[in-house]
Image (spheres, rainbow, N blue to C red):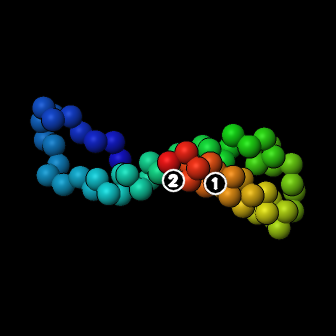
Amino acid sequence: MIPHNSNEKGKPGFFAKAIYKGRARIEQAVGKLKRFKRVALRCEKTKRNFAAIVSIAAAFILVKSAHTA
């Protein structure tokens, strides 16, 4: 859901900002995972191997974000 303009007519009174933030975080995480070539191209065809590659990529992202913060 995209936020409405402040001067828009007929603007709804409620906007779930927490839900919007959560969705943005998920989209950012998927985008970061897709930067890994093996994940983006799905080189691993079996479910087990692909899940392992995604886990390794997520671990790299987590270590990098913890190291830089």
Front residue of 6 and 59: 59
Give x and y (percent) for residue 18: 32, 57
The correct choice, above or below, for 31 with respect to 15 in the image is: above
Which disc is residue 26 wearing? 2
Quarter assignment of residue 37:
top right
The residue at the point 74 percent across, 43 percent down is 36
Specify the amino acid type for callout 2.
Ile
Which residue ends up furthest to the bottom in the rendered image? 48
**Quadrant in the rendering for residue 45:** bottom right
The reply to whether callout 1 and callout 2 are in contact (CB within 8 Å) is no
Amino acid type at circle 1 is Val
Side (left or right) of 29 relative to 2: right
Residue visible at 17% across and 49% down in the picture = 12
Q: Position of residue 9 (x, y in %)?
A: 12, 36
Residue 63: give its label: 1
Disc 2, SS: helix
**Residue located at (33% from left, 42% from top):** 2
